[in-house]
Structures are given as structure tokens and as C-alpha cells.
Image: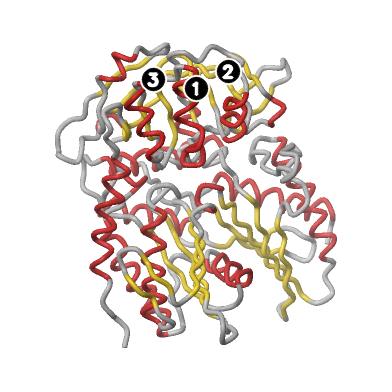
Amino acid sequence: MNKETLQQSMYDLIVETSTNLPKDVRRAIRSAKERENAGTRAAMSLDTISNNVKMADDNVSPICQDTGLPTFKIKTPVGVNQLQIKEAIYAAMVQATKDGKLRPNSVDSLTGANSGDNLGLGTPVIKFEQWEKDYVDARLILKGGGCENKNIQYSLPCELDGLGRAGRDLDGIRKCVMHSVYQAQGQGCSAGFIGVGIGGDRSSGYDLAKEQLFRSVDDVNPTEDLRKLEEYVMDNANELGIGTMGFGGETTLLGCKVGVMNRIPASFFVSVAYNCWAFRRLGVKLSDDGGIDEWFYQEGDKIDLTVGSQSELETAAADSGEKPNVVVLEAPITEEKIRELKVGDVVQINGRMYTGRDAIHKHLSENDAPVDLDGQVIYHCGPVMLKDDEGNWHVKAAGPTTSIREEPYQGDIMKRFGIRAVIGKGGMGPKTLAALKEHGGVYLNAIGGAAQYYADCIKGVDGVDLMQFGIPEAMWHLNVEGFTAVVTMDSHGNSLHDEVDKSSLEKLAQFKEPVFK
């Protein structure tokens, strides 16, 4: 293979995977939009997702700011130099990161230091397999941290909330899969896809589960029992009512693929790999010189998901069918203004907000803030940033990260520094909810994965603090206009996330009785 040609092919694979949603995934999202009731929060979210996909196409920019842990699966004929392929991938990763197509995500687990180029021990993941065919098959999945954190593994037999005992049989497996959808809620950027691995040990079971995510959304399982299981899950998981972003709605799951392997008698694992709606997975067939002969997952027409969309978050009505209350906020925000907000209100933010993720929250729990945060807005976001020749920073992608990770810190930090609003996705827990009520604060749910939509709302970068934590974890000072989100936790003790969790658990119980004989 030609070194330069191979490196360019790997670069093209990375960029296309990050910026161009596969056609089979687009078809699944279009079907979800057709099922959803017009004017609901779920319909609003799907419209925003559609706009975001179109913007990523037009800008050739990351669909989601969390470009995840890149995992390559590569099949090679006997005799192909796998070290040459690995070297090409490393070089392409560095270039794609430099060009803003990937966020620098490789972090030293002991020191917390970010490598800055997505390379490090264990990153990216590259798995080779030899086969008898005469060409190289290279596939890549970019699986973000929000959905990766909702992976789950069950050891049968076990007891499951809402479903009771799950035994070592097909019905026990069915219960685990249904429970995996319930436990993800909106934190993994639903509506999502799941890969299920039955059997193996703890590590090979997860590998098998993730391998299922490389299957086409449209394929049919050749094993009859697994086909029936996949069809059952797809027919029934959407009855849970979790919906897009966990706002409630008709579509919670967009795809389910199941694989099986042998196990030892003492162990029976069911492993589930959850993937968000931003299902970034592509593949290529390479020619002898390393060029691209064919793209995988790109059969059929490329759908423009914005056709028929209302295209505005604020046009969405509450689930009651009434027009939502739209409130404009600009920091510093008073407690009185916050107390007027209630769950279901749509908020548009103008002016200043600050990003803050895991490292920032830990830092603020132990140190003074680098800026005055009284009355301010914190955005749970790790953006993709590029610096121009004049030294100015530009936001390339800026969607919300999963907020529940900040639960140990959030309430205390809000009260200590006077923060009035927190933006993220997936909701937060009882400690934060209690602090919102006591202090006078609000949680705003942005649309997960909509990194281009929100980047377009950011009109300038006014500064940055704590860059020692790396670009994703630094505190960026953002000037925003028309930044829209939904109040899902208010200062009166109300939480949409608690409501959806409770109602979906009640619905989960209807799937308790045996189905497969």
C-alpha cells in the first residue's frame, strides 16, 4: 500500500464518520419523526436533531462535540502489513484533531492530562482480524461518553426493577434488554440504538455487544431466536414512553441488534452497548494501493431530515398541546426571575455563559472561581475549539454533555457561587433538585448531540480559564444569542426526569410475564 494514499483514506474515514451521519441511521430517524406527535417536546427535539445533521453536512463539522473513543475494526488478508495501517491511523487521527474534525479526548487516567492529539495508551482502539478475502475492510465507530456510560452488563439470574427475576433463558435475556433501555433514560441521548452480546466473559461479552453496532440498521438476524428477540424489543421498547432526550414520546429506541457466543457453565452475562441517536459509524473497502474503493452503510438516497421540520425549538408546544412559555434570560439572572420559571418552559439565553464539566466542578468544589459566577449560567459542555492565525478561538461544535456526572458537586457549587442556571442533558438527581429549590436555581435541558445547532448560537469566545485541564474541560467564556433549552427541573421541586423515570418504570412492569416458550 502507498503510505500517503493509505493515510488519506484513514483521514477521510475519520472525517466522514464524525461529520456525515450514515444513510441507514438517517432512515431510522426519519421513521421516528413520522411516528412522533406534532408539537410535542419530542417532536421539537427531533426537529433540532434534523437541523443539526444538515448543518454538520453543510459545514463538514462534527455532528456531536463528543467525538468519543474512536474504535477501528479492520479485516486484512494474510500478509498485509497491519503496522503500516496502524501508523496511518495514528497520523490521520492527529491531523483530524488539528483540523477540528475530532475533539482531543485522550486523557491520562492517572494525571488527568490531555494529550491534545487523541493519541495515548489505548487510544484509539484498533482491532485487527485476518480473513480469506483479498481486500482490507476498515470500519470506525465514534461512540461518545454519554452513551458509553449507559452501557450495562447483567449476570443471570438477577432481579430487575419492574421486571422481577430474569433467569438463564431467552425470557431472562429479553428482560435484561428491556431493562437496559429503561435505565438509559435520556442520559444517553435517546432515541438510541443498542447492541447486545449474550454469553462470553465480562470483557468478550462487551466486545460482542459493541460488534453488533457495526451491523446495518436494516439487516435481519439469520438466527431465528435472535431475530424474534430483536423484533420483540423494537416492537415494545418504544411503549416505555421515555422518548427523545427523555422528554417522553413515541420513540425511545431506533435499533436493536443481538449476537451470541458460548460461555462457561458458571457465568451467564448479557452485555448491552448503548449508542446515541448520533450513531457515527462508517466503513470503507480499500484498494491495493490503500485508496477507497467503496463506502459501507451508505446505500440508498441521502435523506435531508429537515424536509417537513418546523426548524424552531420554540415553536414546539408542551405535551398538553398548549404553546409553551418562552422566557428570555440574560446573566446575571435574579432569583426572582428564576422562581418564575416552571418545568416545560422554553428558555432563550442571550449574553454570557460559562462552560464547566467534570474537572471544573471538582476544581470549584475545592477552590475559588476564576470569575464572578453570581447570577451566571454554567453550560455542561466540552466544545471542539480551533484557534486561528491571529490567536482567536472559534467554536466548531458545542452540544451538551451528560449532567448526572456533576451530581456530587452541582448543588453545593450553585449555592456557594450564586449560580442561577445550569444547562446540560439528561437531568440531575435529588441533591441538585433540593439545591435548586433552596437556592433558587433551574436546570435547562439542551438537545444532546446538537453540536452544530448550538455552535451557531455562540457568537464569540470572550476568554478561557483553567486551560491546564485541556480544551474539553476548560472554562470557556461564551457570548451567545438565542441559545434555546427546556426547563426540566425548576426551583419548586419539580423534575420532568423524575416523572418520566417513574412512568416508564410502571410501563416496564407490563413486560414481566414470559413471552418466549
Viewer-proximal residue among 19 and 338? 338
- Distance from Cα at disc 1 to Cα at disc 2: 8 Å
Residue on which the image places disc 1: 458
Q: Position of residue 356 (x, y in %)?
A: 55, 28
Amino acid type at image mark 3:
Ile
Q: Position of residue 299 (x, y in %)?
A: 49, 62
| Residue 312, visible in the rendered structure | no
Q: Relative to 116, say whether 25 is above or below.
A: below
Viewer-proximal residue among 428 and 256? 428
Q: Relative to 39, say whether 368 is above or below.
A: above
Residue on which the image places disc 2: 461
Disc with the residue nearer the chain's start (3 vs 2): 3
Disc 1 to disc 2: CB gap under 8 Å: yes
Classify mark 2: helix, strand or loop.
strand
| Residue 155, visible in the rendered structure | yes
Query: Which residue lies at the image location 38% right of the left edge and 35% below the top edge?
Result: 445
Amino acid type at image mark 2:
Val
Residue on which the image places disc 3: 349
- Distance from Cα at disc 3 to Cα at disc 1: 11 Å
Q: Relative to 505, say whether 248 is above or below.
A: above
Give the quadrant of residue 79: bottom right
Amino acid type at image mark 1:
Ile
